[in-house]
Image (tube, grey):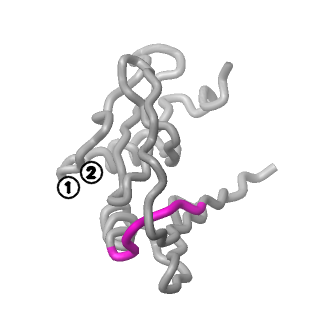
Amino acid sequence: MSLMPFHLAIPVDCLDSARTFYGELLGCEQGRSSAQWIDWNFFGHQLVTHLVAQMPSAPAHNQVDSHAVPVPHFGVVLAWHDWQVLADKLSLANTDFIIEPYIRFKGEVGEQATLFFLDPSGNALEFKAFKDMTQLFAS
């Protein structure tokens, strides 16, 4: 079975900020749009930013590796090199990380890179990469 893109719709409180963040910073191609929403090619998946009058409550947090991981969050698993390029780009853009880019399980089975940050509306994103992609769904 070939992998099909997912569709995710998220709230934002400003479409102009969403354009700057998703379009310019993350480099996502903008698709269809209206005065109320924008479709994005989010690394091959369909992300829709919907304008809302008020954002839902801020994410809660769970402890993982002594880090406060925001829940809910969404993101993409990238190739190792692509994750490093994105991490460098975000660092150069002075991104305010919730969790700075770091390597989990360094030198072990399941080694993975991860980072967390918020979009301008407070939606939490995680980007990660696995040294060995076969470990993505390992139990």
State the residue at coordinates (43%, 17%). Answer: 105
Q: Nearer the viewer, residue 38 or 57?
A: 57
Instruction: Return the x and y of residue 50 as percentages of the image width and height.
Output: 52, 70
State the residue at coordinates (34%, 76%). Answer: 16
Relative placement, left or right, of 5 versus 56 is: right
Mark 2 Cα shell of 10 Å, populated few (<14), some (14-19), many (≥20): some
Name the quadrant containing residue 47.
Answer: bottom right
Q: CA distance from mark 1 to mark 2?
A: 5 Å
Q: Quadrant of the C terminus?
A: top right
State the residue at coordinates (34%, 45%). Answer: 117
Residue at numbered disc 2:
90
Verify whether residue 79 appears in magenta: no
Labels 1 & 2 near each other (Cβ < 8 A): yes
Amino acid bearing label 2: Leu
Instruction: Return the x and y of residue 35 as percentages of the image width and height.
Output: 48, 85
Q: Secondary structure at mark 1?
A: loop
State the residue at coordinates (48%, 54%). Answer: 56
Against 116, is 23 above or below? below
Instruction: Return the x and y of residue 111 as percentages of the image width and height.
Output: 47, 23
Amino acid bearing label 1: Ala
Q: Nearer the viewer, residue 82 or 57?
A: 57
Against 100, is 26 above or below? below
Q: Nearer the viewer, residue 32 or 12?
A: 12
Q: Which mark is residue 46?
A: none
Relative placement, left or right, of 133 versus 67 is: right
Of all residues, the one furthest to the bottom in this rendering is 34
Mark 1 Cα shell of 10 Å, populated few (<14), some (14-19), many (≥20): few
Q: Secondary structure at mark 2?
A: helix
Residue at numbered disc 1:
93
Name the quadrant containing residue 98.
Answer: top left
Instruction: Return the x and y of residue 20 as percentages of the image width and height.
Output: 31, 70
Magenta-highlighted residues: 9-16
